[in-house]
Amino acid sequence: MIIKKFQANTETEAIILAKEELGKDAIVMNIKKISPKGFYKLFRKPLVEVTAAIDDNITYRNDRVSAIKKQNFPDIIYDEPEDSPQTENDNTKESSAIEEKLNNLQSLIEKQIVEKEVNQSANDKSKALGKNLACIQLIYNQLILNDVDEKYANQIISEIEGTLKKDASMDNILSSIYQKIVLKLGQPITIDIQNNAPKYVFFIGPTGVGKTTTIAKIASKFKLEKKAKVAFLTSDTYRIAAVEQLRTYANILGVPLNVIYNVDEIEQSRKEFSDYDIIFVDTAGRSHRNKNQRDDIESLINAIPENEREVYLVLSATTKYRDLISITEAYSEISDYNLIFTKLDETNSVGNLFNIRMLTNAPLSYATFGQDVPDDIDRIDPQSIAKQLLRGH
């Protein structure tokens, strides 16, 4: 008896194959479902395998090539058997050879499928990466347009690139950069009252940046909102107008003002204001290039114990970045300081705020945006600054 197996998409097709090859006298002995294995199962439906038998005394013709084609495999060239009767041994050898070719073919197809998936995955990743890079480039250009130093813009981009997913959306990329900017701006430092001793708050910086007006704005809030006991000191004796301006604010607020010409006089003022909450000290807006003038300010600051003083460097947001670098470096030789930026209403760009924060690592503090006292001042808002840096003018 000759026993053979036939596979097709359906049971009927498999039986037809058996009858065609073994003849109409073939007997179906078993029917079972064959599921493809590996990646192949994603692309082919399960087959039906029919086991059929025929008495070996009955001759039959081997039409295996046509059977293979009916299973939708690529054409394979086989040696066509002669029409003369074959022995069982020949049939067995032929069946094994064809079975081996079928297995090889399946392996080849599976390999091609895997390669296709790998290539597709690589293409998808490449497209996603290209999309990320295009989005990042747009954001980078926006930062540069808003006057962020290239060095710091590149630093932000390099720090977020490694954290992004390959298929990150533009919203995710923008959000990551926004959060990075907010973190780098840090939490602003603002002035507060200490309970154990008067606090001396020094305002330093170049001429014309608005130190005196800034003092008046902050002092007004302490006097009117916190009901603090406030006093003024000024060492800006080089400009009579500056003293008179501060005296006007002092009269409006009803607070004392002392004009000091040397370090000894600040000691006298300390005794006079020993029961005050906070003393605002206006310094002369001297050239940051003049070392002797810087030394005078440093001596004045050092006359107050470090735990009783705070120093604020007042800068104009309209000053050129190159000049801001020189100013901050010069005043860094005098004292540690927090940063106040004035005249934000006179510029469309806040890139310099970010640049100077990164350059000096000094905490941000207040920003002013007009001449009205005390309204046009507020604590710098890192989230607002980040939004401005990431949008157009």
Image (spheres, grey):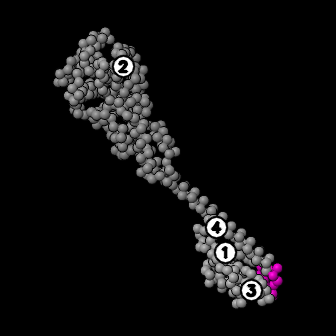
Residue 110 falls in which quadrant of the image? Answer: bottom right
Q: Is residue 263 rendered to the left or right of residue 33?
A: left
Query: How would you rate the neighbour count of disc 2 (Cα within 10 Å): few for under 14, some for 14-19, many for 20 or more?
Result: few
Q: CA distance from mark 4 to mark 3?
A: 30 Å
Amino acid type at mark 3: Ile
Question: Which of disc 2 and disc 3 is earlier in sequence?
Answer: 3
Q: Which residue is the site of mark 3?
A: 54
First-in-chain label (1 vs 4):
4
Mark 1–mark 3 distance (CA, rounded to whole Å):
29 Å
Judge left or right: residue 101 versus residue 9: right
Query: In this rendering, is residue 164 above or below 195?
Result: below
Q: Secondary structure at mark 1?
A: loop
What is the C-alpha distance between the residues marked 1 and 4?
19 Å
Please identify the quadrant where the N terminus is shown.
Answer: bottom right
Q: Amino acid at mark 4?
A: Lys
Camera-nearest label, 4 or 2: 4
Q: Residue 374's image quarter?
A: top left
> In the figure, residue 90 lies in which quadrant?
bottom right
Q: How many C-alpha atoms fall within 10 Å of the one at disc 4: few (<14), some, or many (≥20)?
A: few
Against 10, residue 332 (above or below) is above
Q: Residue 37 got which mark?
A: 4
Report the mark closest to the observer, 1 or 3.
3
Mark 2 to mark 1 CA distance (whole Å): 87 Å
* Residue 236, image x, y percentages: 28, 18
Dot 1 surroundings within 10 Å: few (below 14), some, or many (20 or more)? few
Judging by the rendered image, the residue that carries numbered circle 2 is 307
Q: Magenta span covers which residues? A: 79-90
- Of the numbered discs 4 and 2, the one sitting upstream in the chain is 4
